[in-house]
Amino acid sequence: PVKVIIIGAGDRGRTYSGYAKFFPECMQVVGVSDIQESRRNAMGDLRNIPMNMRFGDWSEVFASGRKLADAVVISTPDDTHFEPCMKALSLGYDVLLEKPCAQTEKECVAIREQAHKYGRIVAVCHVLRYSPYFRAMYETLRTGMIGKIISIQHMEPIECRHMCHSYVRGNWRDSDK
């Protein structure tokens, strides 16, 4: 199995770590990093991660300068993807990176260049790509059911609760923050 460290033990990190439960022959979670001790320990306990592999800030994962696993999953808040990704690549980790890759085009290009420089994989999570809704949409378009496609405009259908939680009161309410 691929040995991974989950960096960011919130909802997405927990979800990705769940793959190890269903496919232990493919993935083993050997470490966890989260600045919130309760989340870090909840995942650590759930995945039987020893205390010496439970890290606070993401930088603690890389502090020794040696690889502790094959890959990392970076599922920290959006504005904290770039630095841990760059560090992980420089140490030889493959990376499963939650979207967005980074905050700017320049940072995205730097990630691509770093991955090429070290010959590592950066896989970006697009969690809805294979959901039933998008598969049905794809099949409808692919088969020509609605005719020849000239143009497509797709907007994410964000319901009122998600809009209020994320964009009015939540983490994405203010682009400066």
Image (cartoon, grey):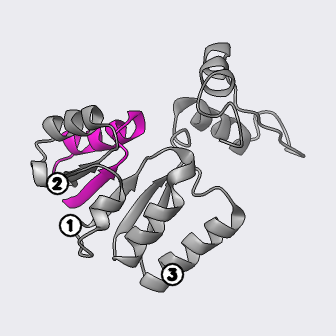
Between marks 3 and 1 in the image, the one whose residue lies nearer the viewer: 1
Q: Is residue 20 magenta?
A: yes
In contact (CB < 8 Å): disc 2 and disc 1: yes
Task: Identify the amino acid type marked 1.
Answer: Leu
To which quarter of the image does residue 72 belong?
bottom left
The mark that comes first in sequence, 3 or 1, is: 1
Q: Dot 1 corresponds to which residue? A: 68
Task: Give the number of the disc on residue 116.
Answer: 3
Secondary structure found at label 2: helix
Q: Which residue is mark 2?
A: 53
Q: Residue 77 in the image: x percent, y percent?
A: 50, 44
Decide which of 52, 143 is in the foreground and name it: 52
The vertical placement of 150 against 46, above or below, is below
Q: Residue at (84%, 38%) from the top-left corner?
A: 147
Residue sitting farthest toward the top: 160
- Cα–Cα span, label 2 and label 1: 9 Å
Name the side, left or right, on which 128 lies relative to 23. right
Q: Residue furthest right?
A: 150
What range of the chain is rendered magenta? Answer: 1-25
Mark 3 or mark 2, which has the lower sequence index?
2
Residue 151 location in percent, x, y?
88, 45
Instruction: Tell which of 64 and 91 is nearer to you.
Output: 64
Q: Quadrant of the N terminus?
A: bottom left
